């Protein structure tokens, strides 16, 4: 999966360096919002004791998810190849409906707007939206 | 008929009393035109939409952003019957403006992001849920008269 222009990649990587130190918190907040605003997503986490915003399992999982995003930034030149294992995990084990990737992406962007009100310009927004879209498509590669 | 909790009602009123309407409307519309460039198809008469800088500084975009936000304020004042309040607006968007209703969601997402940036941490999960529910009702009401 090719993603974006050279400029898009530059913008994503540059923004990522600002985001990286706060990635865990961003992940936890995005996941909390997803579960609160789109309650149907809770169905994937029925095995957690506590689904409330900022709970321990939510924080831990937010960190895991952002680890995946960090990985994708590193493999931005070939997301499909880079995310093969993660795609298999989501396809065969987790079986997350790919429509939910869009929902989580939206919530990541909302958190970025809150944490980086000045840096999350429309130009950064469009590059990140494209990146998360490409990431989502790479993640759905192995589904069928 | 949409059921609003007391928290949701209070939250929507609060958001709209806090945000700078002259900033949010234009910012959301210009963000939509930049992030989802195909939406520019409806604004052929607006002049220079060539790049992000041009869109952000375009006076027609700014003026129209304010028009959109006043439309939302109408819904805020009539939360118990947004469907009826928006009946004419829906016909307008369908019959005269010929806007693909999928675009309403794109603008709604940009509004959420702009309001989040303005409100900062005050835009909690619960506030976001209330705001997105409100926008979903607005979008649904705007889609209603399409046939």
Image: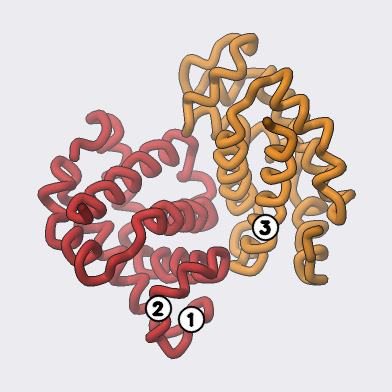
Chain colours: A red, B orange
Q: Mark 2 points at which residue?
A: A45
Q: How crowded is mark 3: few (under 14 residues within 10 Å), some or many (20 or more)?
A: some
Residue depicted at 47% across the width and 74% down the height: A42
Task: Give SS at disc 1.
Answer: loop
Q: Residues within 10 Å of mark 1 (few under 14, many from 20)?
A: some
B112 versus B27 height, above or below: below
Give residue A51's mark: 1
Chain letter of disc 3?
A: B
- Distance, label 3 to label 1, CA atoms, is 20 Å
Residue B26: quadrant of the picture: top right
Chain letter of disc 1?
A: A
Chain letter of disc 2?
A: A
Horizontal placement of A96 versus A84: left or right?
right
Q: Along the line of sight, which residue is nearer the eye, A37 or B62?
A: A37
Horizontal placement of B87 versus B23: left or right?
right
Residue depicted at 18% across the width and 47% down the height: A79
Q: Along the line of sight, which residue is nearer the eye, B54 or A85?
A: A85
* Mark 3 and mark 1 on one chain: no
Give residue B133's mark: 3
Task: Give SS at disc 2.
Answer: helix
């Amino acid at each position: 999966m090719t993603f974006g222009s050279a400029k898009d990649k530059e913008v994503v990587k540059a923004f990522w360096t600002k985001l990286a130190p706060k990635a865990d918190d961003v992940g936890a907040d995005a996941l909390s919002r997803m579960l609160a605003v789109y309650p149907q997503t809770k169905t994937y986490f029925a095995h957690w004791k506590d689904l409330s915003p900022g709970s321990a399992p939510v924080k831990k999982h937010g960190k895991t998810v952002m680890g995946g995003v960090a990985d994708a930034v590193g493999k931005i030149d070939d997301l499909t190849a880079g995310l093969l294992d993660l795609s298999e995990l989501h396809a065969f084990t987790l079986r997350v409906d790919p429509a939910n990737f869009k929902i989580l992406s939206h919530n990541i962007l909302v958190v970025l707007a809150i944490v980086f009100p000045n840096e999350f310009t429309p130009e950064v927004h469009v590059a990140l939206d494209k990146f998360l879209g490409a990431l989502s498509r790479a993640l759905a590669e192995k589904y069928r | 008929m949409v059921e609003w909790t007391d928290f949701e009602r209070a939250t929507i009123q609060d958001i709209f009393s806090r945000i700078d309407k002259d900033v949010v409307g234009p910012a959301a519309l210009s963000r939509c035109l930049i992030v989802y460039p195909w939406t520019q198809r409806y604004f052929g008469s607006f002049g220079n939409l060539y790049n992000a800088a041009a869109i952000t500084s375009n006076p027609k975009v700014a003026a129209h952003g304010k028009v959109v936000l006043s439309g939302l304020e109408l819904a805020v004042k009539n939360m118990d019957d947004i469907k009826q309040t928006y009946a004419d607006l829906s016909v307008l968007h369908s019959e005269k403006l010929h806007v693909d209703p999928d675009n309403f969601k794109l603008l709604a997402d940009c509004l959420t992001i702009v309001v989040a940036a303005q409100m900062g941490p005050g835009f909690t999960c619960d506030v976001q849920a209330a705001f997105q529910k409100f926008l979903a009702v607005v979008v649904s009401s705007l889609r209603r008269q399409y046939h």
